Amino acid sequence: MTANGTGTKKVNIAYYVNSAITILLMIIIGQLPPFGHISEMGMRILGVFAGMMYGWIAVDILWPSLLGLVGLGLSGFFTVNSAMAGAWGNPNLLMTFTSSIFAFVFDACKVSDLIAAWCLSRKFIKGKPWILAGMLIIASMLIGIFANGIAGIFLLWTVILKIAKYCNMPKGDRFVSLLLSVVVMGGISAGCSVPFRGGAIIFLGFANSGEAGKIVNPPYTSFLLYMTFIYILSFILLLLWSKFVMKMDTSKVILSDEIIAELKTEKINFEQKVGIAVTVLFFGMLFLPGILPATVPGMAWLTSLGLIGVSFVLLIGLAILQKPDGKPFLNIAECHKAVPWPVLWLFGATFPLADAMKAPEIGIMSTVTEALLPIVTNMSPFIFMAACTLILGVVTQFTHNMVLGAMFLPLLCPLATQVGANATVMFFLIYIILNCSYVTPAASMQAGFIFGHQDIARKDAYLFGSLLLVFTYLILVIVGIPLGNMIF
């Protein structure tokens, strides 16, 4: 809405037109005759998917997600209540919820101020914003490998926004958008690189669930090193492109000598000391079960707590703790102000949507499979792997990556063996490209972090997601296939 010269407001016609298209897509596509293997119920699911996609791109994140959940509830596959339960009962959404609350504590204790000030006052970073960007990516990847990528995302976001505040960088600044985006990509990618984490276990299970049985079983060390190496190359290319091709303006990412001297002389107060201790304890409680045997006392307890339980235990402890003035250290109700509701509702809509789209009775994925197989079956091993990676890399931007993994890994890994390709390399190509799903809000859970963040411009979200996809694909084809054939 914009004001005109008479003091009245102009109606944003485009907004209402796009809103109407969002609703009509859900209704009209749902009433079209079925095709391929898609059932009538599948057409209604397809209509909800198309409407939400259009709404997320052209209108908003929040209300199209709510509308999509209602549409799923009316499709016949869910009820409205079961669609909502599928959204809010998903552990990934609950982990995001608790991580955002804990990040509020991290920021409220001004720990993010300390870290931001430390980063900006280092001599090796002064005047070198791209080294800062590299440090943040490394930090996000280390947290993703050793602790929890989702928790690291929210904590690093507070640091980045504090850096932007120190440097007087406006909301929507492209470099800030890049930093906010790459810590998501780094944290999630690194978490996927750990072979005994949930994501890797699930995708390996998909690959070995076909008729050929267990044909993909890479060693843990090779798994971690190969995945991490590919992702690091992708991020290096993304930063180099942003600096030398896009020539991104980073002139504001510097503080005067006077401000740096002032930051160095600031003393750590009681709240910051508590915040640092709790942050170290937080990551320690998440990290230790992954490196110590389960027989060590307390490890089984920490494992059963998980991210959600650890967050709540520490929040309760902070609520009990009192400040020197006798007031509670933490008001838990205040923490809920930091919850990114658009992100949560976006996640919530994609989880039941993914469940519906992969259901056999819906017929959407079997129709997609039937259309793609004739394209790839008569190719050389290299072209087969490159083509499958490209096709799935594009398709996953419009369909949840977990759905595609469940459908195509048990199909394409054995098929790779039949055409003379390496089934393990085929697994890694698919696994990595499916986790580069950041181009659209519907691509994956991790895309929701970026598209739902209020400080990341929508056009930048599309841009950085597309660049990461292109660079990762090129690295996989040029480096990943020959390197994989040597290792596995």
Image: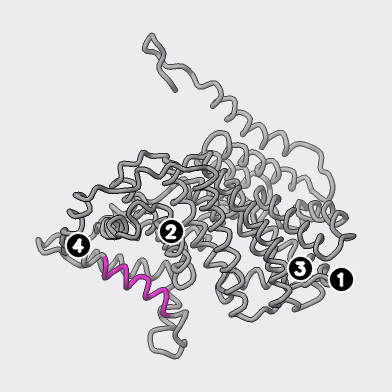
Measure the C-alpha gap from mark 2 to mark 4.
22 Å
Along the viewing direction, whichever of 425 and 54 lies nearer the viewer: 425
Question: Secondary structure beneath disc 4?
Answer: helix
Q: Give the mark nearest the N terminus, 2 or 4.
A: 2
What kind of residue is marked 1? Gln
Q: Which residue is mark 3?
A: 410
Badge nearest the viewer, 1 or 4: 1
**Residue drawn where x is 27% and y is 67% of the image:** 276
The x and y percentages for residue 327 are 14, 59
**Residue drawn where x is 30% and y is 59% of the image:** 123
Measure the C-alpha gap from mark 1 to mark 2.
41 Å
Measure the C-alpha gap from mark 1 to mark 3.
13 Å
Q: Give the mark nearest the N terminus, 1 or 3.
A: 3
Q: Name, please, the residue furthest toward the left.
A: 325
Q: Quadrant of residue 26?
A: top right
State yes or no: discs 4 and 3 in contact (Cβ < 8 Å): no
- Examine the rendered structure and indicate whether residue 193 appears above or below residue 162: below
The x and y percentages for residue 267 are 15, 61
Q: Which residue is mark 4?
A: 271
Q: Which residue is mark 2?
A: 153
What kind of residue is marked 2? Ile
Q: Residues within 10 Å of mark 3 (few under 14, many from 20)?
A: many
Residues drawn in magenta: 276-288
The x and y percentages for residue 282 are 35, 70
Q: Name, please, the residue furthest toward the bottom.
A: 295
Badge nearest the viewer, 1 or 3: 1
Q: Which residue is mark 1?
A: 418
Q: Residues within 10 Å of mark 1 (few under 14, many from 20)?
A: few
